[in-house]
Structure formats: C-alpha cells, structure tokens
Amino acid sequence: MLCCIGAVARGVTDPDANDASPTETSSDATEQRTSSEPDEDTDTTEEIEETELEMPTVLDKNAAVAKDELERLGFTNIQFGSVDENNDTIGVVNPTNWTVVEQSHEPGEMVFSDAVIVLGCVKNT
C-alpha cells in the first residue's frame, strides 16, 4: 500500500482511472495556488496584538490552581520554580503537590499576556 501512495504522490496515475496527464494535474495545482494569493492592494501582514492584563495575587494557592487561574485570564507563559529549602527537589514536576509563595509580578501590576510569569513554590507536606 505504501508503494502505491508514493507513486501517486510522484504524479504517476493509473491511465484507466483518470484521463488527465501528470503535467495537467501539476498545472491545475499551480493555478489553485496562484488563485489563492492575495491582491497587491491587500495588506496581509498579521499584527500580533499585545494585551496587557492586570496581575492577580496567586499567593498561598495550589500551584496547579494558580496556573489555571492565570491561563483563564489570558496569560500564556507561566513557569514554576522551587523555593523550598526543606526539600532536595530539582524543580516543580507536579504542580498539584506545590503551593505558590512568591510571584514574579506584583498583584495589580499591568503585565503583557505573553510575559514570563514565574511562580515560586514550596512542596506540600
């Protein structure tokens, strides 16, 4: 079956199945591509709109809950860091086992939605 798929992808067709030659098929595809090109007068540059959001407080919340709340508000780059001096952990692997004790942006601060937000966490005991 793979052999047949490869043959069709290269423009080899069954002569009984279709009267179009490989050349006609490739020119049809070229016409389709060129017909979907934008007009010269149309501005096609997509502008990414940066959104500023007010940073809430997520201190003393479960890290997974805090991340969910921030994502629902529109923040897209939330990271965790361990500030737990009592545990020899490399980092926050499962946020549900951690509590937020620090946040990189103050509550009420206006922050871009794609800015890095670091939540400092301690492991739940």
Image (tube, grey):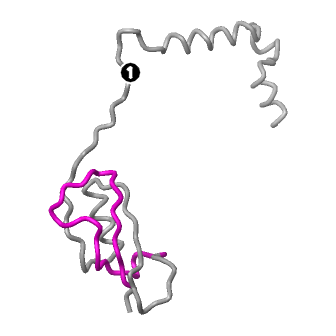
The residue lying at 50 percent from left, 84 percent from top is 89
Tally of numbered tags: 1
The residue lying at 19 percent from left, 55 percent from top is 110
Percent of width and height locating residue 75:
30, 55
Q: Is residue 53 above or below residue 8?
A: below
Q: Quadrant of the C terminus?
A: bottom left
Disc 1 residue crowd, few under 14, some 14–19, many 20+, Cα 10 Å: few
In the rendered image, which quarter is residue 106 located in?
bottom left
Nearer the observer, 54 or 106: 106
Percent of width and height locating residue 28:
63, 9
Nearer the observer, 118 or 61: 118
The residue lying at 81 percent from left, 13 percent from top is 16
Q: Is residue 67 left or right of residue 33?
A: left
The residue at which mark 1 appears reads as: 44
The residue lying at 74 percent from left, 8 percent from top is 23
Nearer the observer, 2 or 125: 125
Q: Farthest residue to the right: give it.
A: 3
Q: What range is drawn magenta here?
A: 93-122
Nearer the observer, 91 or 12: 91
Q: Is residue 10 above or below residue 42?
A: below
Q: Amino acid at mark 1?
A: Thr
In the rendered image, which quarter is residue 97 located in?
bottom left
- Give SS at disc 1: loop
Percent of width and height locating residue 9:
75, 25
Percent of width and height locating residue 32:
56, 13
- Residue 107 magenta-drawn? yes
In the rendered image, which quarter is residue 41 located in?
top left
Q: Quadrant of the N terminus?
A: top right
Q: Is residue 24 above or below residue 4?
A: above
